Amino acid sequence: MAWFSGHAFGRRRWRSTGALAAVVLAFGFAAFWRLTTPQTVAPDALEARAPDLANGRTMFLIGGCASCHATPHQDDPTRLGGGLALATPFGRFYVPNISPHPADGIGRWTEAQFVTAMVKGVSPSGAHLYPALPYPSYQRMRIADLRDLFAYLETLPPVAGRVPAHELRFPFNIRRLLGLWKLLFLDGRPFAPDPARSAEWNRGAYLVNGPGHCAECHSPRNFLGAIVESRRFAGGPSPVGQGGVPSIRQDKLGNWTVDDFAALLASGATPDADTVGGAMAEVVRNTAQLSAADRRAMAVYLKSLSALP
């Protein structure tokens, strides 16, 4: 009888422990689900306005949209059928079709869905997008600029064709986990001008850190693939998997003048009579089409990037 009583007590204790574990597990899952729920921009948050297509084209150029999204192996930078493969430590990403094709591109997206993708990293279906789309930088953009960019993209030719699905290793293929990544590395703050700096410097800082997303290539990354902020612009891995991307701070380019930076953005020529190549040549093809004032503003900001230890 004593043995039976002890055995029954053990079973009751086991059931209590199991019930507590189930409650904790359910609470933890609910907290995880809530914390990782994708955030969106409501359509009524965007007031009616007439788009500025010229500004949209400027955002298209400084953003280098064609460099990644143009259909490979053709020369028209306005045919944004995607398909470029990006090899990363997490797997292979395929750049999507962002042409206004209604089935294969973004032709059925609303303005609010486009803004949501760019600043929140969330697709129209409500799924987290991978930060291979550099929305940690695009979140700094002004909403008006994003809306102008969307209007400009709608004027480009629709391109048929779906791109392959990403080929990612476990657990990186679980999109819901990106909600935790965003809690760590996506702050949702738009660009804030520095009142102690000139209007030209602030324009350059906005173009470089927002639509230009220069830090996405010119910075090292941690093991989760996020920029190491303390080493921002201090050089990073090559986006095409060959070599590295140099520092653009004054510890490396201290002898460059503002005119030197501006000249590189216009022609690709460096002060030592060389020219840039690789991915940077693609960047210059875009910045060469910007206004001289915008290139100079970027140069003023780049020259101000102090050396790091």
Image: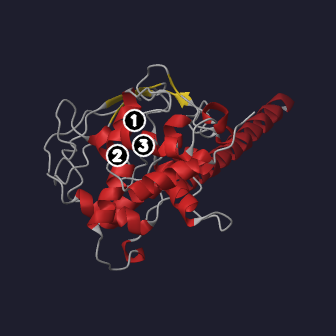
- In which image quadrant can residue 223 be found? top right
| Residue 171 against residue 216 in the figure, above or below | above
Relative to 21, residue 152 above or below:
below
SS of the residue under disc 3: helix
Callout 3: few (<14), some (14-19), or many (20+) C-alpha neighbours within 10 Å?
A: many
Residue 177 visible here = no
Estimate the spatial distance between the alpha carbons at disc 1 and disc 2, rounded to whole Å.
Answer: 9 Å
Q: Amino acid at mark 3?
A: Leu
Q: Residue furthest right?
A: 2
Q: Residue at x 44, y 62 (%)?
A: 40
Q: Is residue 162 above or below residue 207?
A: above
Q: Residue furthest top?
A: 243
Residue 185 appears left or right of 131: right
Q: Which residue is mark 1?
A: 268
Looking at the rendered structure, the kind of residue marked 1 is Gly
| Tag 2: amino acid | Ala
Q: Nearer the viewer, residue 128 or 256?
A: 256
- SS at badge 1: loop
- Residue assigned mark 2: 288
Proximity of marks 2 and 3: CB atoms separated by less than 8 Å:
yes
Residue where numbered disc 3 is placed: 265
Is 134 or 307 nearer to us in this picture?
307
C-alpha gap between disc 1 and disc 3: 6 Å
N-term-proximal mark, 1 vs 2 = 1
**Residue 304 horizontal side relative to residue 123, left or right:** right
Quadrant assignment for the N terminus = top right
Q: Is residue 245 left or right of residue 103?
A: right
Q: Are marks 1 and 2 in contact (CB under 8 Å)?
A: yes
Residue furthest out toward the bottom: 48
Question: Residue 46 appears at what percent x and percent y?
Answer: 39, 74
Identify the residue at horizontal 41%, vertical 70% (top origin). Answer: 42
